[in-house]
Each structure stands twice: as C-alpha cells, then as structure tokens.
Amino acid sequence: MEGKKTVNEFIEKFKEALDIEGEFDINVELEEFAEWDSMGYISIMSMLDDEYGKEVNANQLKVCKTLVDLYELISK
C-alpha cells in the first residue's frame, strides 16, 4: 500500500512539474504529452532533484519511454 502511495505522489509531482491536468497511470507513454520536450526535461530534472534528491541528465530522460521508466530512475 505504501508503494502505491509513493507512485501516486510521483505522478502528481510529474503533473505539477509539466503543468499537466487529467488522470493517467504510471504506464503512460511519455510521448503522449506535448510537454515532454527539452523544456519538459528541464522541469523534470529540477523536480527530481528538489523532491527526490536525484540528479539526472537529459540523456537519462531521453531513454525513458514510460512514466514507469522515469520512476525507476529515482528508485535506484
């Protein structure tokens, strides 16, 4: 149960960082979001650093295909 809460919190932080509304789950393809571009990468890098203390670079983000992939970056 705690893991699910953490995933849901991550989704909310992702939505806030990219200013996305609506509902989706962790398996969503990142390319579905128009906001998933170079500016979006910067917003996500900043959010991951601020909220999770994880520094990632654009190359690490580029290989992420789904929100699961992105979540796994902070889970390592």
Image: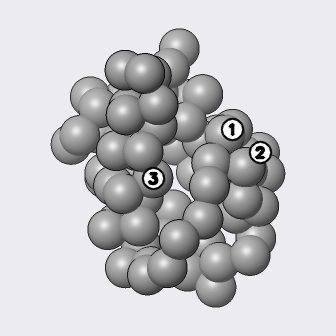
From where the camera sits, is residue 42 visible? no
Q: Quadrant of residue 50?
A: top left
| Mark 1 surroundings within 10 Å by alpha-carbon count, few (fewer than 14), some (14 through 19), many (20 or more) | some
Residue underneath mark 1: 69
What residue lies at 53% left-to-right and 71% top-to-bottom?
23
What residue lies at 74% left-to-right and 76% top-to-bottom?
32
The answer to the question of whether label 2 and label 1 lie on touching residues, with beta carbons closer than 8 A, is yes
Residue underneath mark 2: 63
Amino acid tagged 3: Ile
The kind of secondary structure element at disc 3 is helix
Q: Quadrant of residue 19?
A: bottom left
Query: Which residue, as the protein is rendered here, is positioned at the far front?
Result: 1
- In three-dimensional space, the C-alpha distance between marks 3 and 1, rounded to whole angstroms, equals 12 Å
Amino acid tagged 2: Val
Which mark, by number, is residue 11?
3
Mark 2 or mark 3, which is nearer the start of the sequence? Answer: 3
5 left or right, relative to 66: left
